[in-house]
Amino acid sequence: MAIYNNELRNKQSEGILLRVIGTAEIPQKKEIIQSLTDAYIQRKENRKSLDPDIYTKYFYQFSGLSCRVLGTFFSDDSKSLIFGTDLENFLGAHNYRVYKPQKEQLKIIVNENKNTEKQVQEKIGVLRYASSQSYDENKSYAPDVFLKTLDIVAKRTAFFGMTRMGKSNTIKIIISAIENLNKAHNKQIGQIVFDINGEYTFSNQQDEGSIYNKFKDRVIRFSSSLNKTKEHKDVRAIQYDFYNDDTLEESFSLLCDEINAERKVDYLSHFTNIGMFKDIDTNDKKEREKFHRHQERKKALYKCILYRAKFDCNPNFKLKFTGFTSSSLRSIPRDGCTISEACEYFKGVDQNLSNIDEKYKQDNDWSALLKVFKGESVSGYKFLTRFNYLHSLKGGNDYKKDIDSALRDGKIVLVDLSTASTETQQKYIDRLCSYIFAKSMEKFTNDIEPESIQMYFEEAHNIFPKDDKDLRNIYNRLAKEGAKLKIGISYSTQEVSSISPSILKNTQNWFISHLNNRDEIRVLEKYYDFSDFSQSIIRNSDIGFARVKTFSNNFIIPVQIEKFRV
């Protein structure tokens, strides 16, 4: 730090904060090297020490440092220390004195370099200069580094680094900081983690505890693993109960998406477009009743298809629908029948629809459903057996509503998607984010303040778009509009280039650990002053060593992130 006295301001002292980024050549460099080389040669030839005189030694000590000006510290009228991010004026070098800050000064520099109102702070680690820590072997030099927790709330935060470099650990520290803020100041900031690997929801051998272990009384867990929902009574199924009428339309839509992702041929394309949920535009009461009876008949046949495709079903489950008026088909009891009895009924319907009411024969929906129900090839109901992992009898109400409600109550929601395919993970997360966003936007447009919600995305390269052409994409909207809705997003991945520029441009908080690719570094250098740390980020692979730029810090700070513990 360079400090000088300003005579124009009653000898007010100002300090210019410098970051050393390398060496700089000085005009005497050539002469110094020549002199040192000559002395070395003479010493070898004469086989005796030829120590230089005191003036030469003084000459040898000249060297130059290349520095980045980070800003200026000065005092206001109230004698409070203020930091400005630029340089108002500069003088000749002989007007300055240069100091190396010690622990107490460093603590102020890294934690209080922005003139903001007092905020809740949480320790996240200690200042660290380099991989080598020989300068601070007794841990007496490097100060603690604190995070202003509100920097994360309703902001966008990025965690970049190679696998096992400490990204997940840092996210756990952030989640804990926000939860501590909730407890200490009676806030209700909901947090949701899309847990791709299950490490936040359940303990594993590599990490020392999960978020669930630390905040059990505040956590609600969901999982795509049927085994996990059986092992842990408190874990709810994120799957739908495909037989539940309340979520039937939503679950059918999910099934169709999965089918279309794999196969879009023959009559399955008709099956995925059937209109079981549409209404009729008429005021004729009798016509409406007939139409609704036929819609219920379609839903019953659809559930029979699920049953034949081995979607688990309670044996006492009953279907209520009105059968066809055909002499060749038995009647359906008014109180309904079991699903196996319904299957036998629909097996009796002729493949050519010859024994059903004339007015239904032209219904393509009915024809498509019946073909899948009776199909004996892999293209029929047998093809659907590969999707029965989407279903769980433990799935009750619409999981999106339950999760949204818990978040607005300030809970931590952990969504374990470790057993789902990448495509299925994407669909679950897309739907859930869109639902939460829509509910917050609805409140905002009705002049109701939305609740604060934080979203955490692991393996974001599998979830976020790689370009920003589609500004209607839910993640681009979260990046651009999330702040006004009090929705914050935190995302982690191994590659900076895998994230849409639209999201990167709106990111305020950055946690960067080891990256081994110069192409990724070049993308990173576009933001803030990460170019000063390019070589360090590539060379240094120490776990938990991050270069941190937060909303309330005016410059990047190298930090050794502390270990998350339960």
Image (spheres, rainbow, N blue to C red):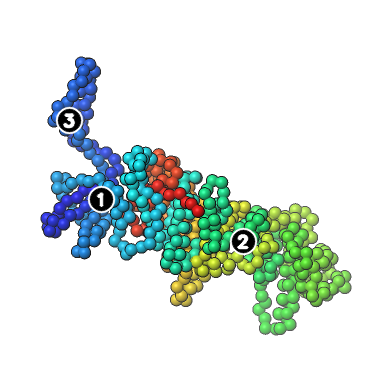
**First in residue order: circle 1 vs circle 2:** 1
* Local secondary structure at mark 3: helix
Rendered image quadrant of residue 354 = bottom right
Residue topped by disc 3: 57
Q: Amino acid at mark 3?
A: Lys
Could you tell me which residue is drawn at 49 percent across and 69 percent down?
440
Q: Mark 3 and 1 residues: CB-CB less than 8 Å, in contact?
A: no
Q: Amino acid at mark 1?
A: Leu
In the picture as drawn, the residue positioned furthest to the top comes out as 46
Depicted 300 relative to depicted 172: above or below: below
- In three-dimensional space, the C-alpha distance between marks 1 and 2, rounded to whole angstroms, equals 53 Å
* Local secondary structure at mark 2: loop
* Local secondary structure at mark 1: strand
Q: Nearer the viewer, residue 528 or 292?
A: 528
Q: Nearer the viewer, residue 281 or 163?
A: 163
In the image, residue 402 lies at what x, y percent? 58, 67
In the image, residue 318 lies at what x, y percent? 77, 69
Q: Mark 1 and 2 residues: CB-CB less than 8 Å, in contact?
A: no
Q: Nearer the viewer, mark 3 or mark 2?
A: 2
Disc ID at residue 17: 1
In the image, residue 46 lies at what x, y percent? 20, 16
- In three-dimensional space, the C-alpha distance between marks 3 and 2, rounded to whole angstroms, equals 74 Å
Judge from the rendering whether residue 509 lies leftward or rightward of residue 344; answer left or right.
left
Disc ID at residue 234: 2
Could you tell me which residue is drawn at 25 percent across and 59 percent down?
82
Rendered image quadrant of residue 501 = bottom left
- In three-dimensional space, the C-alpha distance between marks 3 and 1, rounded to whole angstroms, equals 30 Å
